[in-house]
Amino acid sequence: HKRYTTSNLFQKVDWKKDVNNELKQWIYDRFHHFVSIFEWNQEQLIHIVPQVHGTGYSTAVKICSTGFSALSLLDAGWYGQGIYFSSSAKYITPYLTDKKNPAIII
């Protein structure tokens, strides 16, 4: 089991070869910017950056009760299979428009 830190998390360089690699580099740089904002990250091996995830209310309750599941296997996603988060609640708002009872997990 490999232990990731912010220094080796992005060592896989395949993400740089794909289309929109300038955008992906910007996101990578932005992550490091957010890491530097939070004082608690200064001496930590694993950096913590608060993020939000938008979903429906009933799904949010399940996630809070049992954690995220393997639903990420259903969607290839922008960076590959996964469950996505954002540092901006404004950014995830469009993803909530089709939800009957939208919810944001922080």
Image (cartoon, helix red, strand yellow):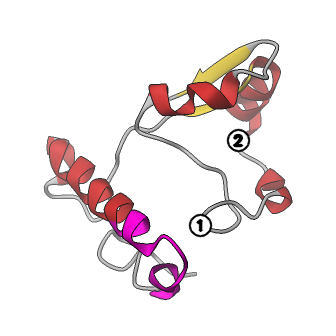
For the N terminus, the quadrant is: bottom right
Q: Secondary structure at mark 2?
A: loop
Q: Which residues are magenta?
A: 13-25
* Residue in the image at 27% along x and 62% along y: 29
* Residue in the image at 59% along x and 66% along y: 79
Where is residue 87? Give x, y as percent. Answer: 41, 38
Secondary structure predominantly adopted by residues drawn in magenta: helix
Which callout, 2 or 1, points to the residue nearer the camera?
1
Q: Which residue is mark 1?
A: 79
Residue 20 vs residue 33, the one in the foreground? 20
Where is residue 104? Give x, y as percent. Answer: 59, 23
Disc assigned to residue 103: none
Where is residue 37? Give x, y as percent. Answer: 17, 43
Residue 90 vs residue 33, the one in the foreground? 90
Residue occupying the far right of the picture: 74
Q: Secondary structure at mark 1?
A: loop
Where is residue 28? Give x, y as percent. Answer: 35, 64
Q: Earlier in the sequence, mark 2 or mark 1?
A: 2
Q: Based on the displayed image, in which of its 4 quarters is residue 81 positioned?
A: bottom right
